[in-house]
Image (cartoon, rainbow, N blue to C red):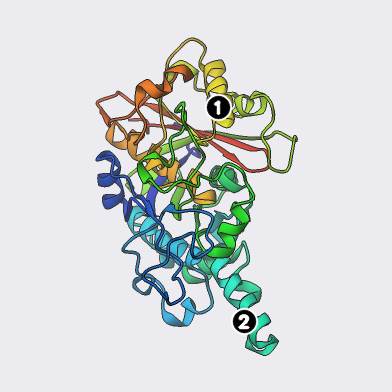
Amino acid sequence: MNARMPVITGIGVVAPTGVGVAEHWRNSLAGTARIAPISAPEPPAPTNGSPSSADRGLPISVAGEVAGFTHTEFVENRLAVQTDRWTWMALAATGMALTDADLDPRREVPMDLSVVTASGSGGNAFGQREIQALWRDGPRTVSAYQSIGWFYAASSGQISIRHQLKGACGVLVADGAGGIDAVAQARRLIRRGSSAVVAGGTEAPLSPYALACQSSVGTLHRGADPALAYRPFAAGASGYVPGEGGAMLVLEAAHRARGRAAQVYAEIAGTASTHDAHHPSEPAPDHRQLARAMRTALDRAGVSPDRIGVVFADGAGDPLRDRLEAAAIAEVFGGRRVPVTVPKTMTGRLCSGAAALDLAWAALALRHDVVPPTVNVDPADVAASGLDLVTEAREGAGLRAALVVARGVGGFNAAAVLTAPAA
């Protein structure tokens, strides 16, 4: 193994599938679907029973919410009033990832520690609340923290302050591809000499304003049945379901991880990003740039397609985008039917938290040699795609390498190759 090969030594998860790695992984292997009728945000007091999402003017009926996440367990009140739910989740996941890695920043040189997060929309609920206060009650009622609470880089900044990570810090904005881009930047920092980097992404895009923004994208699922809501690669796919949460990872150079006898989930062997340069929201009419991202990640990792044991697909849930991704997979892997999974069918698409959570899933799959399943999709219903879609957990798959694929609205494509740690 290259001494400066970036490896994952810690994982923190705040997702609909669970708060913490253990709960998340247990529910993932059980195929526990957590897409359900949306309960947030809190509706106005009803006049006749509980209002439906339509009564509240929301463009969706179901979503992937994080049940049981109590932010006061992770964020003190003084900080909570300055920040948004998306940052609360990032702080919680970071704390869990550092604990999982057995890495105490207080014992490290602060300038050698970095943080890179991904964010697609920032602090939606915080920003909406303050804008409403501005128009309802005037500028004097707007919080002094409005200037920082909504900002895309707020999570990176608050993580840096809390844990005194004073090396290179930043945020990547690439919608659903952002989590891989953040880890790619962390990988570069590790190779340039950083001791450790906290990287990943979370999102809280279920406030009314955030949902209104998403509703302009024509691929948002509008139905009310959770079991039929998000079915990527299925013949009857009808769009995506939004969700909240994500994951944070601790990355270190392989030699440093070995030196302190740290656990290693996986190596980040190669990453790549491309852009369609086609349209602000519509996908390109072909899959060339997506396939190029996948091939480049494999080339940089020095991993041939036949070594990949599973593909964690982007899985848009939109017939056109799914066809393009299936075509890209077919091109990269030739005639081989590589196993493909979309475990985010349990959570919904988490915007910039999605790829980060997929990376966590892939690392856990390599660690435990189990492929988590795609739920609510009948294999017969995806026959036309030509994919070997994993719909039940596959144990003993002999996994040594995984490919994670992600796309973002606006033409962003990203891919990452994770490999099992060398013996």
Query: Callout 1: helix, strand or loop?
Result: helix
Nearest the eye: 9 or 411: 411
Whole-percent x and y of residue 307? 43, 19
Left or right: residue 100 versus residue 250 is left
Distance from the alpha carbon under mark 1 to that under mark 2: 43 Å
Residue type indicated by callout 1: Glu
Nearest the eye: 365 or 315: 315
Indicate whether 331 appears above or below 79.
above
Give the quadrant of the C terminus.
top left
Could you tell me if residue 207 is visible in this image? yes
For discs 1 and 2, the disc positioned in front in the rendered view: 2
Question: Which residue lies under the disc numbered 1?
Answer: 325
Nearest the eye: 224 or 240: 224
Circle on res. 157: none
Q: Residues within 10 Å of mark 1 (few under 14, many from 20)?
A: many
Farthest residue to the bottom: give it: 140
Query: Callout 2: helix, strand or loop?
Result: helix
Whole-percent x and y of residue 171? 61, 56
Question: Which residue lies under the disc numbered 2?
Answer: 133
Circles 1, 2 touching at the beta carbon (< 8 Å): no
Whole-percent x and y of residue 31? 28, 40
Q: Residue at x 44, y 71 (%)?
A: 42
Could you tell me if residue 123 is visible in this image? no
Whole-percent x and y of residue 286? 67, 24
Q: Residue at x 40, y 40 (%)?
A: 345
Count of numbered marks: 2
Q: Residues within 10 Å of mark 2 (few under 14, many from 20)?
A: some
Residue type indicated by callout 2: Ala
Give the quadrant of the N terminus.
top left
